[in-house]
Amino acid sequence: MRKSIVMAAVAGVASAASAQTASLSIVASQSVVNSAVTTSITLAIYADADFATNVAGAAFTLGATGGAGVVDGMALGSVPTWGGLGEGDLGDGGDGNYNGVIMGQIIFLPFIEPDPASALGSGPVLIANMVVTIVAGSTGVIDWTVGGGIGTFALELFDANANPDGNPPGESFQIAAPVFGSEQVTVIPAPSALALLGLGGLVAGRRRR
């Protein structure tokens, strides 16, 4: 029930978007993790599009391959202040998978303007930070993919310049299947030790020559 209410809050007046590109992507704070030293990393989730003026909201999941025995847990670290009104946290799914995050803002021109921090056109817009706890001493390669499937759309955009004579002006676009990005993180117990082993192999090879 709560999920439906939150989704409705960020929906607005929407129409299907076509012939444009929108995306949800992941950027890890570290691509190679020394699990002997590092206990957690952050996955930053971004939204972007080549149309509209602002990100109005998102409802995304995270899927992982290779997280079993490497990921101890995941949690929603934060969403931007502008997206907190529609925040919903569906919780950790285990092994690097996340059941879902819902976030968004209410836009109702001319009374409620979109937050400037949600503006498109100057690069991807941060929509959430996910905190991943790494199992100490673990090793493996984790492939994360952002996805949808929580509700009817994974990303909502707003164009403040559209429909200027409307009541209200502006137009929302709900995208069920934007381009879903992925990120790979390699976890090894001691990168420096492995690097030394590689260097030792090179030295031994030169001696044999």
Image (cartoon, rainbow, N blue to C red):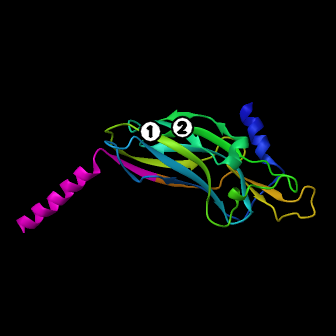
Q: Quadrant of the N terminus?
A: top right
In the figure, is residue 11 to the left or right of 151?
right
Residue 62 point in image, percent of width and height: 55, 44
Q: Is residue 182 left or right of residue 61?
A: left
Q: Position of residue 83 (x, y in %)?
A: 69, 47
The quadrant in which the C terminus is found is bottom left
Looking at the rendered structure, the secondary structure element under dot 2 is strand
Answer yes or no: do the residues labelled 1 and 2 have beta carbons within 8 Å? yes
| Residue sitting at the far bottom | 209
Mark number displayed over residue 150: none
Give the x, y percent position of residue 180: 58, 54
Mark 2 sits on what residue? 75
18 or 57: nearer the eye? Answer: 57
Q: Which residue is mark 1?
A: 133
Q: Which residue sits at x=75%, y=41%?
A: 7
Q: Residue 35 at x, y = what percent?
A: 34, 43
Q: What is the span of residues highlighted in magenta in the rendered image?
A: 184-209
